[in-house]
Amino acid sequence: MEKVESKLMKKIICLIILISILYCSKNPYYKKYKVVMRYDNCISDTLYVFNYKKPGINTMKYYDMKGREVIIMQQYTMCILEKYQVPIKNRMGETKYKRGVIMPVIYEPRGKAREYSELACNLYTGCLHKCKYCYCPAIRRQSLDEWANNPKARTNILKQLENDAKKLFKTDKKILFCFMSDPYQDEEAAFLTRQALLICEKYQFKNVNILTKAGFRAVKDFDIIKRNNWKFGSTIIFRSEEYRKEWEPGAPSIESRYETVKIAHKQNIFTWVSVEPVIYPDESLKVMQDLKQYVSKWKVGKLNHNKEIENSINWKQFYYDAKDILNGCDVYWKKDLLNHIK
């Protein structure tokens, strides 16, 4: 009886080993994906994730290079650029990773951001302006304080920018500096931005656009902008300095932005103003009245991601009031705003 049980146990063990071998032969690898996380107006740093799907389990888990679980939100994922299999562990239990390709720093925005520009480049991660309506901290899964307190230039950003610029030699596509941070948020950023503009000039970019709240700090680069017939833009959504302090506590004054737009206009630089997000319609209308004669193009868009304020505004009335003020002006109305007019 004992011999029978012993033989049975051996058979069971052999069967388990055989099943394991068969399973491993079919599934000896985790799958590795290079996934680029694309958000409404930017691409984050390239994220490398691994997944492993166990038999009978439909859920898929993703992990970054440090083994931390990553949640991929489908609406923010551009695409899987590259898919290949690599061993995760060798016989000694050591983890092995295969190196992937770095995503270009000049990228094509999607969604709402595409309305602003065909191409874009973010030089910094983080922004000192600490705007309360900024969506970037949520994208990066940070608090507003974390996002604003320690901004950093992206690693080797100028070298990467030059590599991308070579491939886009003499491009006439519109490129925007910057979506996720202000290119002139401090002196270091201003220096970096000037170097970036010189790279764009070197490779004869035809349609570079600046968007900033930084005011006078940007004037130093008007020489580059003017000689290349590029465009200078400023985000101005309030006339009131009190509202600016409440919503954009780290940003330069409204007066400095007004004056910078006027200086650019005086130098025959194409000027544009982004009145987005509209938070207090009366304030935005005052900006339009004040700067109408100095602005070559307006871009107007509503507030998003704040239902309480959004629902309190009569967007249709705002649109018609703004349209009256900007009568005869070149205006781009954001699609989100136009959806409320129908």
Image (cartoon, rainbow, N blue to C red):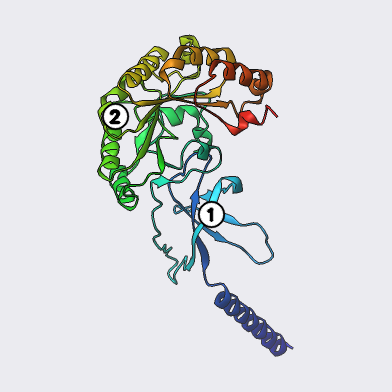
Does 311 sit left or right of 194 as displayed?
A: right
Q: Quadrant of the N terminus?
A: bottom right
The mark closer to the camera, 2 or 1, is 2
Q: 68 or 229, which lies in front?
A: 229
Q: Position of residue 247 (x, y in %)?
A: 50, 18
- Judging depth in this view, the residue of 224 and 229 nearest the camera is 229
Residue 313 percent coordinates (x, y): 66, 19
Q: Based on the displayed image, in which of its 4 quarters is residue 291 positioned?
A: top left
- Percent x, y of residue 135: 53, 32
Query: Can residue 269 be seen here?
Result: yes
Looking at the picture, which amino acid does disc 2 mark?
A: Lys
Residue under the image location 72 percent in, 89 percent down: 4
- Disc number for residue 226: 2
Q: Quadrant of the C terminus?
A: top right
Callout 1 amino acid: Cys
Outermost residue to the front: 328
Question: Under tag 2, what secondary structure?
Answer: helix
Look at mark 1 in the image and give the residue it sits on.
79
Circle 2 residues within 10 Å: few <14, some 14–19, many ≥20: some
Q: Is residue 209 left or right of residue 131?
A: left
Q: Nearer the viewer, residue 86 or 322?
A: 322
Query: 298 above or below 86?
Result: above
Seen in the image, is 144 located left or right of residue 317? left
Asked where in the image residue 253 lies, by quadrant, the reply is top left
Residue drawn at 53 percent across, 19 percent down: 326
Mark 2 or mark 1, which has the lower sequence index? 1
As helix, strand or loop, the secondary structure at mark 1 comes to strand
The residue carrying pointer 1 sits among few (fewer than 14), some (14 to 19) or many (20 or more) residues within 10 Å by Cα, namely few
